[in-house]
Amino acid sequence: MSKKILLSGVKPTGRPHIGNYFGAMKQYVDLLRSSNYHCYFMIADYHALNFIQNAEEMKNNIIDLAIDYIAIGLDPEESTIFKQSDIQAHTELAWIFDTITTMPYLMRAHAYKDAEAKNKEISVGTFNYPMLMSADILLYDADTVPVGQDQKQHVEYARDTAQKFNNIFGETFKLPEPMIMKEVAIVPGTDGQKMSKSYNNTISLFAERDEIIKSVMSIVTDSSGELPVNVYNIHKLFRNENELKNIYEENKGKYKILKETLIEDIDNFIKPIREKRESLVENRSKIAEILEKGGKSAKKVAEKKMEIVRKMVGVAIA
């Protein structure tokens, strides 16, 4: 049986935290190791232009994200790791999708509604990103797109767009399915809210021990209860819940001990991937080669799809 196609994209907008890992990145590694999927891991640098408009910062972030991918266990020999900007078909297909998409439909996007609610000046890129995201997914005939629960709308936009294109021009695109790992769909931060850089409540995925200690000791605890819920909810990412119940039962109300135990568990988990990342940083030219190779591979697939799309819409007259 042929492998299913899995595609995921991450914006190079800063260093990942454990919420990014358990909410998405771990899924990528598990799915790649399952051997059931051919995986495309895209660095969504054109999407990142909505947030980063500094060339040097963008370059560094792209390389850093590629290093992060490989450090967590994504093997570039077993998957395709590439930059979105290396494949011009993404923006070409996004324009074609623009022509069949209405403004009221795009106004339903969470990012647009959030920016509007905060009375922000909204760029065309922010307004239009669902169409570029749809192009990202549909170019590769993705069967599966791993997303967090709060990102499910991204796949819904891709499905709607594929269906609308197929209805207008003829059967062309496969309808992708979201993959949501419910038990880790939303990872809690140090304050109990969803872990997010915008909330300043994260624990860095490659943190040094001192940084781990500082982050864990800042976790908000409720002194009225015997179980520090915020500590426990993060801790269960690193340990079996049966083990945790015994530890927390034996240390009722001893928040300092429980936090120290969490520090050890996080450090033991992070240390090997942190060390692997440090070794990769020494050879950034090799990372650029991996991205170039991945880009060439992805481009062949994307261009083959675009040849079909151009024929379907009538612009390929030969």
Image (cartoon, grey):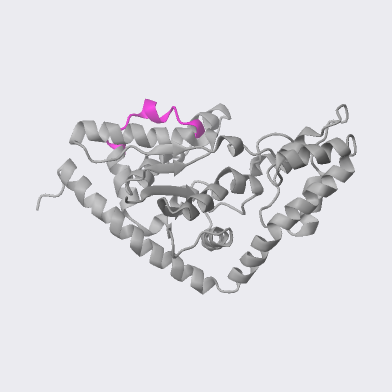
287 on left or right of 238: left
180 on left or right of 223: left
**Image location (x, y in percent) of residue 102:** 33, 29
Magenta segment: 98-111
Closer-to-camera residue (33/217) = 33
Q: Is residue 161 positioned above or below 135 on the image?
A: above
Q: Is residue 304 positioned above or below 220 on the image?
A: below
Closer-to-camera residue (210/62) = 210
**Image location (x, y in percent) of residue 138:** 33, 44
**Image location (x, y in percent) of residue 49:** 48, 50
56 on left or right of 261: left
Residue at point 69% right, 45% down?
Answer: 202
Regarding residue 287, the answer to whether it shows in the image is: yes
245 on left or right of 198: right
Regarding residue 100, the answer to whether it shows in the image is: no
In the rendered structure, does residue 147 fall within the stretch colored magenta? no
Q: Which of the 4 quarters of the picture holds residue 219?
A: top right
Residue at point 56% right, 51% down?
Answer: 13
Q: What is the count of numbered marks?
A: 0
Residue that extends furthest to the left in the rendered view of this protein? 318
Closer-to-camera residue (2/292) = 2
In the rendered structure, does residue 105 fall within the stretch colored magenta? yes
Q: Which of the 4 quarters of the picture holds residue 107?
A: top left
Residue at point 65% right, 44% down?
Answer: 197
**Image location (x, y in percent) of residue 157:** 39, 34
